Image (cartoon, helix red, strand yellow):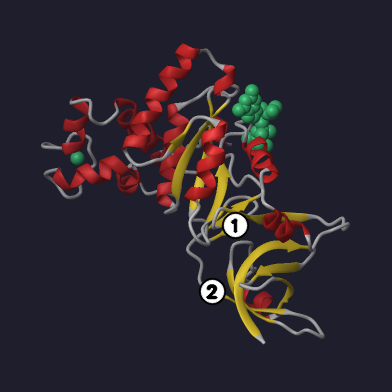
Amino acid sequence: MTAEGIVVGLIAGFYDVLTSQQVVRTRARGVFRKNKLKPTVGDRVKIQIDDQGTNYLLEVFPRSNLIGRPALANVDHVLLVMSAVEPDFSLQLLDRFLTFFAWQQVAVSIYLSKGDLTGEKALTHLKSDLDYYQAIGYPVFDDWSGLAVKLPEAIGPEQIWTLAGQSGAGKSTLINHLKKDLSQETAAISTSLNRGKHTTRTVQLFNLGKGFLADTPGFSAIDLTPIKVNELGNYFVEFKRASSQCKFRTCQHLKEPKCEVKRLVELGLIKRSRYDDYLLMRTAIANGQLPEYLK
Ligand SMILES: Nc1nc2c(ncn2[C@@H]2O[C@H](COP(=O)(O)OP(=O)(O)OP(=O)(O)O)[C@@H](O)[C@H]2O)c(=O)[nH]1
Ligand SMILES: [Zn+2]
């Protein structure tokens, strides 16, 4: 009997595939080795179920992306953890992450962690910065209890979410909180096959809302250098929207006349720090530089 499903775990050479009925532990067919295609957590796959013998993973359907370390396939959405302090909040870092994920065609929500460790005034300031990001289309969560309620609602059917953020931002802490809140059903999926076994595993998906969250933080550093300089503006979502009104179709929003992006920056409708970061990133990409904190 064959079935389709999603790889939710990779354990000691076995692939755990969640079908509409159950989790099936499978082995990958040798054909994958020949093709140099390694099935990955997040992959949508076809399997063969043999009640007497070995179950096989037969086919990997085309991926929308393959990102993070450990790698995860078909990521729909990143929950980006940005700490208020320790490490200090940085708009520059935020813009770099957002650009990277826009380039990877992954949606992003932002979670501000460690708000409890900073003063009220600084926190108000941070939140007003984040209001801008909310307005251009990135959902922002700035308190833990709000996130715990809204995150499961936000994860759509079969969507795969993963966490990103600087080292120390609070990704693991957040995952552990979320896992504690899991329903019986969810716990069953992630543990029933691993009870009492000591195996090394890479990344595992657990059910959250109608979809999945990876149990291992996917990103603490990103590399922007593969992005083409003249395409960078496409990954600043509000620049991209405005650019249809620029005089030149290929406008880079630098010194060109009748540039809508620059007009909106002057009017204060596009955040100036975003424009400044755009210029900085252009230079960094052109020079093949990786900022120190991303190395
Ligand atoms: N006060 C406070 N501390 C937090 C919060 N979130 C995380 N921490 C603490 O910050 C430290 C780092 O958190 P982690 O969850 O390990 O950070 P991480 O992003 O997983 O870090 P890496 O594994 O290095 O990528 C830990 O000591 C946490 O207890 C928060 O919202 N408030
Ligand atoms: Zn322009």
Instruction: Describe residue 130's horizontal placement relative to residue 204 as left or right.
Output: left
Instruction: Specify which label sits upstream in the sequence, 1 or 2.
Output: 2
The residue that mark 1 highlights is 72
Please state which amino acid type lies under the numbered disc 1: Leu
Out of 168 and 19, give the one closest to the viewer: 19
The quarter of the picture where the N terminus appears is bottom right
Label 2, on which residue? Answer: 61
Q: Nearer the viewer, residue 285 or 23?
A: 23
Q: Secondary structure at mark 2?
A: loop
Residue 185: x and y in percent read 68, 58
Q: Does residue 288 show up?
A: no
**209 to 117, vertically: above or below:** below
Q: Residues under labels 1 and 2: Cα distance? A: 14 Å
Locate residue 266: give its quadrant.
top left
The residue located at (71%, 60%) in the rendering is 189
Side of 42 where 188 appears, left or right: right
Ligand 2 - quadrant of the structure image? top left
Count of marks placed on residues: 2
How many residues crowd around disc 1 within 10 Å: few (fewer than 14), some, or many (20 or more)? Answer: many
Q: Is mark 2 within 8 Å of ligand 1?
A: no
- Whether residue 133 is situated above or below residue 2 in the rendered picture: above
Q: Are the residues at dot 1 and dot 2 in contact (C-beta closer than 8 Å)?
A: no
Amino acid bearing label 2: Phe
Quarter of the image with the C terminus is top right
Quadrant housing residue 274: top left
Which one is nearer the viewer's eye here, 41 or 24?
Answer: 24
Which quadrant of the figure has residue 255? Answer: top left
Determine the residue positioned at 50% across, 24% down.
89
User: From this viewpoint, is residue 243 visible?
Assistant: yes
* Residue neighbourhood size for the residue with mark 2, other residues' Cα within 10 Å, grouped as few (<14), some (14–19), many (≥20): few
